[in-house]
Each structure stands twice: as C-alpha cells, then as structure tokens.
Image: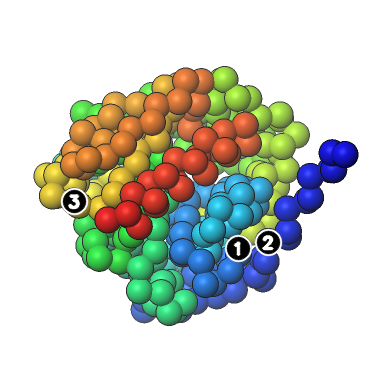
Amino acid sequence: MPTRPKPAPPVTVSDELFAPVSGDIELCYQTFGDPADEPLLLVMGLGCPMTWWDTDLCEMLARRGFYVIRFDNRDVGRSSRATGRVTRRLLVRGFAGLPTRSPYSLDDMARDAFGLLDHLGLEAAHVAGVSMGGMIAQSMALQQPQRVSSLASIMSTTGRRTVGWQHPVLFRNLLASSRGREGYIRSSVATWRLIGSPGYPTPQEHIEERAADTYDRGVSVAGLTRQMAAIVTTADRTPRLRGLRVPTVVVHGLADKMVHVSGGRATANAVPGADLLLVDGMGHDLPPALHETFAQAITRNAERATAR
C-alpha cells in the first residue's frame, strides 16, 4: 500500500548574529543547517541585504548537505556603515575608466567575508555570489584560493568594461532618490519591472514585501554609492582569473539587462575548466522557479571540489 512521502525534517536556522571582521566593520549574518556539513557562503549583490537569498533557497541548500551562511555586506542591512562620500562625478569617472579613488574596494569586501569565516572558525568554504557578490566571490578566490573550495559566479562579470554592460537607463534608476518607505517600495517595483526575469515573473506583491523588508532592515543611499564606487574602480580581473584553479560554475540569464550575458561568458572563458550555465528567460534576479536550478549548479560544482 503506498504511503505518503515523509515531510523533510526542519532545517536548523540561527538568529541573526554579528561578527567583527575588520577595523570597525561588523557583519550581520545567519546560518542554516548543521555546522558539521560543508560550509557554503552566500554573497549578495549591490545594495541588497542577505534576505535576498530567499530562506527557501537557503533551506534547500542546507538539505543538500551544506552549512549555509548568508550575510549583509558592509553598508547594507544591519551590518556596519562605512565612511566616505562618493559623488556622481566620481562614479561617472569610474564608469569611464578614468583614475579615481573609492572609500573601499571589492578586495576590502572580500576580506570582510574572510573575516566572517574566521569568526566562525572555518578554514575554507564553498562560495556563491550574485552580481556584485559574484565579483566579491571572484576576489576571494583570487586573494586566498586555498580558502575557497568552489566558486559559483551568478549573473556577474570580470570587471572588463567591454563585457557585462548595463543599459544607461538602469544607471539613472539606481541613482534615483526615493523618499520614505513607500517611495522606496515604488522605486523597487519600477526597478524590478526593468531587470526581473521575463520568463519567471515575480508577483508585484512579493516585490513589495521584499522591498518593505529591505527598507526596514536599513537602507543607505550613501552606502549604495560607496558600493558602486568599489565596483567601478576595480581593475579587470580577467588576467588573474586565467590562473585560477578553483572549481567554478558560472550561471547567467540570457535576459539579464543589468549585467549583460557577455559578462558571464567572459568569466567562464577566463577561468580554466569553468562550467557555464545560461538560462533562457532569466533576468537579474533569483526567481523561486529557478531555485532548484541554482541549487543543482552549486551542488554539482561543489562535488567537483570534493572529487579532486
């Protein structure tokens, strides 16, 4: 007689905790799963808190045998705010490839992530990063490859200005100011209409809920511009990526308007032996309908690391 499938056991989820990582920077983080499992560090993108790694995806990865760690980057959510003023002129000069200085770099943000691993007593971890988070993950693998067991670079790019470009209207949208909680929610809905996955649309009410949660966790326009400055003032990583020997998977949407798919292709071409997964209908987000796709890509790449 057939029996009903047993429900999956609940995943252990920590409270939101804090880790001093470098100087005056303290990161807010949260873990999913068993600390005895393989650690997986999830790095989020520009201006996005750790909660944009959906809880369902984190729990799915934990059930696959990972000890999942998500965190707010500096200048986002509940993590520390940095200092330093960034002007539009600085950002324009950076986008144009002209010499300029930012308050901090992507390498500094990579060191923050290593500081979190140190706080947790972890010598190494699998690392998956989205957009700017993919750039940080690449920087981690280049800085200390022995501490990055495998690398998943999702809808990201190499820093080379001739690939991974965005439409100019998106640049203006990112810098558009919005006052108050309701203004931030309206702005988020407008942004996601431009960059979300056309093949896997997210209902507007879900976008509004996520935007409200993001605002309530803490939004910093100055922090956003500092992160943007870190991106545009970072040198092309392509020459260094060619020497990387970390198992790597690159995932990119064919409908990505924020980071053109050429950025993903360039990343996969630069890293020896990298796998490239191009997803039709995927834009610049992590829609629930693709969670299984992301989980499979990360898991298979991690298995390459354990097989070495």
Separation of disc 2 and disc 3 at Cα?
34 Å
Q: Residue 126 versus residue 226: which sits nearer the camera?
A: 126
- Please, which residue is most extreme toward the front here? 1
Considering depth in this image, is 101 or 79 the residue closer to the camera?
Answer: 79
Q: Pinpoint residue 156: horizontal percent, then vertical percent.
A: 36, 39
Residue 249 position in % (x across, y down): 34, 41
| Badge 3 element | loop
> Could you say whether the residue bearing mark 2 is in a helix, strand or loop?
loop
Residue position marked by numbered label 3 in the rendering: 244
Please report contact status of discs 1 and 2: CB closer than 8 Å, yes or no.
Answer: yes
Dot label at residue 32: 1
* Residue at disc 1, secondary structure: strand
Query: What amino acid is found at the position of numbered circle 3 in the picture?
Result: Leu
Say whether residue 274 is visible: yes
Disc 2 designates what residue?
11
Indicate left or right for 84 with 245 as reference. right
Please state which amino acid type lies under the numbered disc 2: Val
